[in-house]
Image: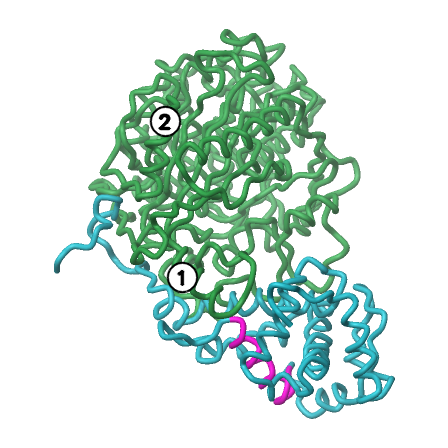
Chain colours: A cyan, B green
Amino acid sequence: MSTNDPVNLKQDRRQWLKASATVLGASLLPLPAVPAEPSQAETAPLARSAETQSAARFFTSSQHALVEELSESMIPADSHSGGAKAAKVADYIEQVLRQSLDDNQKSVWREGLRLIDLMSQHYHGKSFVNASSEERIAVLTVLSDNDHMTDLPEVRFFRELKHLTVRGYYTSQIGIHDELEYQGNRVLTEYVGCDDAAPKPS
Amino acid sequence: MDLNKTYDAIVVGSGAAGGMAAHVLTGHGLQVLMLEAGKKLPIEQELRSMQWPYDNPYRGELPPDRHSLSFNEYTIRRPPYGPGWEKSKHLHSYIGDTDYVKNIVVDERENPFTGTNYAWVRARCLGGKTNIWGRLALRLSDYDFKAKSRDGYGEDWPIHYSDIAPYYDKVDLYLGITGVKENLPYLPDSIFQRPTKLNCAEVTLKQGLQKMGRVLTQYRAGVTSDGLKHNQYRSRCLGRGACERKGGCDIHAAFDSPTGLIYPAMDTGNLTLRTNAVVREVTVDSQTGKASGVHFIDSQTMKDYTVRAKVVIVAASTLESARLLLLSKSRLYPHGLGNSSGHVGHNFCEHIMGPSVAGQAKDLVGKAPTLDDGRPGGFYLTRFRNLAEKHPKFIRGYGFEGGSGHTMFPRGTDSHGFGASFKEEVRKNQGSYIGMGAFGEVLARYENYVDLDPVVKDKWGIPALRFHYQFGDNEHRMAEDMKETAQEMFEAAGFKIVHVSGRVLTEGWSIHELGTARMGSDPKTSVLNQFQQSHDVKNLFVVDGSAFVNASCQNPTWTIMSLCWRSCDYLADELRKGNL
């Protein structure tokens, strides 16, 4: 998987969906994926039991851990500031989805989390959480490179993941203050202009 | 409110026009009753201008049980927006998409309308839309008032710039405005307080435009930057930031009608305010043919009231005012009050929006963050079409509003990619973006109009408005030109073009609806005279944007208030003389 040579997602996905069927049982096979289709994850035995266990929360604890890793891959910690994990973006996403009245959005997430693990199994032989940082980036790069293919549920999931991670991160304390060093929301004595922008000795 | 009293004047509406009417008339010593359909909100608690997103339960977004209509939803759905959002407890117009404005804008389902698609933004609360307006405060000129004399289209206004200029001055001084003098004949200067400053990308654009003979000036904001000694309710602008967040200013440096006009009017002791008063009809004395008062419904109890006055002043917003005149049918006025011309609801016009450009000043990438959104606005790029030369494809003009620099929520997050490089790019690029969008004149046409829907009624049983309104060829040709010139100007400034759009937004998007009871000297083709007084009913005045003869391309609020001030001076004088 080289970034210079993007994979053909539509061709590839047949293989990883097929491979997953043999591993996990054919009942999980989400083919063909059509936009209006009710979420199969909702009827899947695993998801159902998780919901009964914790009706108040949207994600199971393992899903929550997966979302933490996914969001961190989207906006990672670097030498400048903390990443999505430190900014508790997964908690934000959990809250949005728990309160959401949009069933379509919910099923995009439920199904997406499952498809991400299938992809990780296909490309690297392990779940996303157990994959290395490089391996995670490789899986997400496949989706990012094909982010125009919005008929595919995993692509819709990737776009949702990016949207909510961006939203959650840049509205967090870490995002606003540490990362962007936003200067506003305080009292200024004078409007700042181009002439004032040059750094002055204090 | 005293139901046994005959007030000197009833003012229907408490926005820019209603507030100004109350201010001027109480100043003349008149006893005024103001009726507002909505509530008096604890507005500072609504706006929370200094709240950090992470301290808000929804990070500033709309609570999940509410929905605000998106552009796509406007294009695929037609009003009334009844079915389809059953899960959402409240449905709002596009502007109602934050936690800070949710109680200011109306619930669309309580206030339905029918007909052609329209992004009709209504704020039913004390102060109306002035609580959340965009603050751009521009004057009109004789290029607008005498536009017909210049290009032959439509009608001239029954006033010259010289008639209204002293009132623009009064509004400037009473409410405060920031800006820079430019000496442009087509965009007269105001009496400005301390101006904001352009940031570096904006200076680059200004310099690029100078070579083309075009003018970029600091955003002329209806904001007091030096403070107002005569007003105890408003602070000067403290440059705090987050002005881009839709939803007003909780220290009232930005003008809003309650703190700027209504509270000072109440301090005179001459103003009575009645909120939750949904006016459904202007009543008429069948002997004299004059307006005698209004019927209103208490929005909470649904109880019906009648109040009397010597003069009725309608200031309910362009479309609501037209609706109220059409609702006020009687034996004497079978087509609605003041409508012998048949022009009430017609000549409906506004500003077309959509075409826009976003660019990047590459030399600003990676620069240390600055406070760019601590200004009430960025810049205004003034009209340049059909001034000296005649454009071959369309008449009239357009200007651009724009801004650049750092914002609390960064620009550029819609770029491709993810991960470490995405994060770094967002950080380094955040201050380098610049963007602008056009506002163009929509021609006033008799064929664009509103009337009453024969079936659909609002929550209070009042017939809903029905729209027959669309942009025409002139607007669409103008929009093509907007897109081309936007790109051309950003290229001239040396910006990297990030995005260019020619997409026209839904009718109504500018929230500048105008013209539904236009002024004129001929009672056969106009509803009001030059003092916004009904040709038919001498003690009826309509003092909001509905009086406009054309839309011009400048934002209307400052003109609405200046015209209203002039008309109310005349009204008070006429009342004193016994002519009403």
Q: Is residue B179 positioned above or below B333 on the image?
A: below
Residue B490 left/right relative to A4: left
A115 relative to B322, above or below = below
Residue B461 rendering spot, x and y as whole percentages = 71, 45
Q: Report which quarter residue A129 is drawn in.
A: bottom right
In the rendered image, residue B528, in percent from the top left (x then y), is placed at: 54, 18
- The numbered mark 2 sits on a residue in which chain? B
Q: Nearer the viewer, residue B242 or B51?
A: B242
Q: Which residue is mark 1?
A: B427
How many C-alpha atoms fall within 10 Å of the one at disc 2: few (<14), some, or many (≥20)? Answer: some
- Check disc 2 and report the residue beneath it: B215
Span colored in magenta = A59-74
Tell me: residue B522, above or below residue B284: above
Residue B278, by quadrant, is: top right
Assess whether residue A157 is covered by the magenta stretch: no
Amino acid at circle 2: Val
Secondary structure beneath dot 1 equals helix
Q: Position of residue B309 (x, y in %)?
A: 49, 31
What is the chain identity of the residue bearing mark 1? B
- Measuring from the top left, give residue B501's x and y in whole percent: 58, 39
Task: Give the residue displayed 27% in from the left and 31% down from the top.
Answer: B180
Q: Is residue A93 visible?
A: yes
